[in-house]
Image (spheres, rainbow, N blue to C red):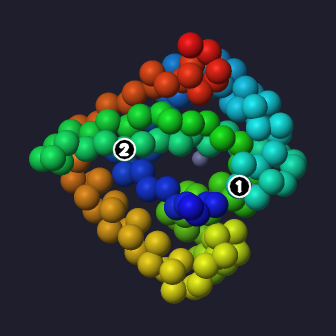
Amino acid sequence: MKKIRFECLPPALWGKNIRSELGQQQWDISRKKAYKRHNHRCCICGCAGKMNAHEVWKLKISQKNNYGIQELVDIISVCDDCHNVIHIGRSLSIGIPFDVLIQRYIQLNNISYEEAIDDFDYIDNKLIVLNSVTRWSTDLSNLSKIEGGT
Ligand SMILES: [Zn+2]
Ligand SMILES: [Zn+2]
């Protein structure tokens, strides 16, 4: 089990999240609960400091690839450096060097450079499939379970 994984969300899902679906107020509540649940520490490297709430999604696509559901499965707290690795596509687009991101990925997972590059290529290819999905819906029904409710 890898400590940190690259996440790949197709552009169609960028900006579709708790904030966009339920509003800023609910997002503020949910992200603060996430920080508290995880004792204000990074769920990946364990460091303390300024945290980001990261939404973990499960993407389910129909066999014909014409319909997809993004299901919220967790909200974790992560530090800036780990968050940048998770969102490697976005990080590259804002100018964070590939080497910085891949080296952190290698260290946290204790794997070889080759394996890290394989993982990156895998995500890159998966995005091609995800980008072919034309309709997406967002499923936030796990939110209360994630937050310890019913
Ligand atoms: Zn971290
Ligand atoms: Zn995130």
Q: Could you say which is closer to the camera, residue 101 or residue 148?
A: 148
Q: Which residue is mark 2?
A: 59
| Residue at disc 2, secondary structure | strand
Q: Closer to the N terminus: mark 2 or mark 1? A: 1
Q: Residue at x 80, y 54 (%)?
A: 46
Q: Which of the image's four quarters has the N terminus? A: bottom right
> Residue 44 has which mark?
1
Q: Amino acid at mark 1?
A: Ile
Ligand 1 within 8 angstroms of badge 1 C-beta: yes
Q: Are marks 2 and 1 in contact (CB under 8 Å)?
A: no
Label 2: how many Cα within 10 Å (few below 14, some 14–19, many 20+): some
| Residue at disc 1, secondary structure | loop
Q: Is residue 111 left or right of residue 107?
A: left
Label 1: how many Cα within 10 Å (few below 14, some 14–19, many 20+): some
Q: CA distance from mark 2 to mark 1?
A: 21 Å
Q: Position of residue 115 (x, y in %)?
A: 51, 80
Looking at the picture, does residue 88 appear above or below residue 47?
Answer: below
Q: Residue at x 44, y 56 (%)?
A: 8
Query: To which quarter of the image does residue 39 belong?
Result: top right
